[in-house]
Image (cartoon, rainbow, N blue to C red):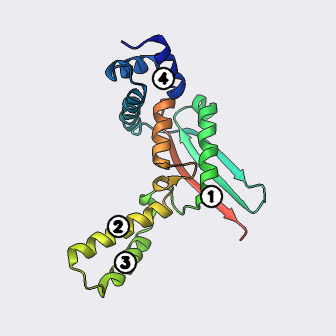
Amino acid sequence: MANIDQLKQLREETSAPIKDCAKALDEANGDIPKAKEILRKLGKILAEKKTEREVKEGIIDSYLHSNKKVGVILEIRCESDFVAKSEDFQNLSHEICLHITAANPLFVSEQDIPKEIQEKEKAMYTEQMANSGKNKKIMDQIIEGKWIKYKQETCLLEQNWVKDDTKKIKDLLTESIAKIGENIVIRGFKRLSIR
């Protein structure tokens, strides 16, 4: 059984519900790092269940860099007006705006990449590999690897978060969905720059 100090510490560090913290600590035999991992996995499961729910509320957020040469407008949705006005949701939105400013993604997700661009990129990779002398299986693996790298560079949800490169933006969203308790969706963004 977890002691009250461990429970308090885990709750403060994760913002997870007390019931979930107690269950995770029991399962981890009082080991806080293990309990955090259990909560993280639980959060992903809960977040996956919530992604089916409709998002009718949200905000349009913006960020303008201090040099006035780059700015972002972001549409981010949630299920309720209450959450849209919450500090956690507002902070998430701001962090994503900052990330877009720094990382310059072109699309929200792979589904937003036009078919023509997908075909053009894959054709270019195939052409690059044509004279490599490698067998087809290895060529296909290299082409797939190049496509994955392209998605990681151009799709917001696939990019590593600029503030913590151990997390992708989609992981940041999943954690927020688990913490806030509502589905959250990035509908779109526009990044403008003078360069």
Badge 4: residue crowd in 10 Å (few <14, some 14–19, many ≥20): many
Quarter of the figure that contains the C terminus: bottom right
- Find the distance from the CA under tag 2 to the CA under tag 1: 24 Å
- Find the distance from the CA under tag 3 to the CA under tag 1: 27 Å
Instruction: Please state if 58 lies on the left or on the right of 50 as rendered.
Output: right
- The kind of residue tagged 1 is Ala
In percent of width and height, residue 76 lies at 57, 45
Residue that label 2 marks = 145
Badge 3: residue crowd in 10 Å (few <14, some 14–19, many ≥20): some
The circle on residue 10 is: 4
For the question of whether residue 74 can be seen, the reply is no
Dot 3 and dot 4 residues touching (CB under 8 Å): no
Please state which of the two labelled residues, at mark 3 or mark 4, is closer to the viewer.
4
In percent of width and height, residue 86 lies at 62, 30
The circle on residue 102 is: 1
- The kind of residue tagged 4 is Leu
Badge 1: residue crowd in 10 Å (few <14, some 14–19, many ≥20): some
Asked if 93 appears above or below 121 in the picture, the reply is: above
- The kind of residue tagged 3 is Tyr
- Find the distance from the CA under tag 2 to the CA under tag 4: 38 Å
